[in-house]
Amino acid sequence: MRVEDLSTYEIIEKRQIPDINSVTYLCRHKKTGARVALVSNDDENKVFYIGFRTTPKDSTGVAHILEHSVLCGSKEFPVKDPFVELVKGSLNAMTYPDKTVYPVASCNDKDFQNLMHVYLDAVFYPNIYKNESIFRQEGWHYELEGDNEELKVNGVVYNEMKG
């Protein structure tokens, strides 16, 4: 978001921060009520993150599983492969005890815009709505490899947390 694009926002607070030669804006999106913080300065680094309150009701790890599930394809990017490749370099997400965030950073404006597009499509239009098996794959599920094999628990987040 650029300062000149603030017409769709109500500016709640504007503050100068001389220590970092910046102007900050706390805004509220008029249509959705979403809160947005903007730091404007002449730094070439571009940083953005979208975050959601994900306060748990229990210890099942649902927020962490959803964090992973969001990066398993989306409306405009329907397959997991591009997300897997991006995770290796640019994409990342973090689940904290009370929130989940998806940060983007780049000095290259085109790269920054593309990454924001991928992230926003992922968090607002994830494939999990079309394919609930994504949740089980990323969380935990039972596997039976053969008729005489032992039933095993498996899953991306399950193995990540176990390790």
Image (tube, rainbow, N blue to C red):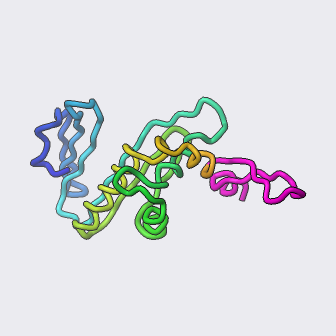
Residue 135: horizontal and vertical position, in percent? 58, 45
Q: Which of 3/79 is in front?
A: 79
Report the residue at 18% width, 47% height from top.
16
Task: State whether residue 57 is above or below residue 131.
Answer: above
* Left or right of 46 on screen, residue 125: right
Q: Which of 83/106 is in front?
A: 83
Report the label total.
Answer: 0
Residue farthest along the front direction in this orientation: 147
Residue 21: horizontal and vertical position, in percent? 19, 57
Residue 62: horizontal and vertical position, in percent? 59, 40
Report the residue at 66% width, 57% height from top.
160
Q: Is residue 64 visible?
A: no
Report the residue at 19% width, 42% height from top.
15
Residue 139: horizontal and vertical position, in percent? 63, 47
Report the residue at 48% width, 41% height from top.
99
Q: Which quadrant does the C terminus fall into?
A: bottom right
* Left or right of 116 on screen, residue 56: right
Q: Is residue 38 visible?
A: yes
Instruction: Based on the picture, tell me whether residue 160 belongs to the magenta stretch.
Output: yes
Question: What are the residue bounds of the magenta stretch?
Answer: 139-163
Residue farthest along the right direction in this orientation: 148
Instruction: Based on the picture, tell me whether residue 153 belongs to the magenta stretch.
Output: yes
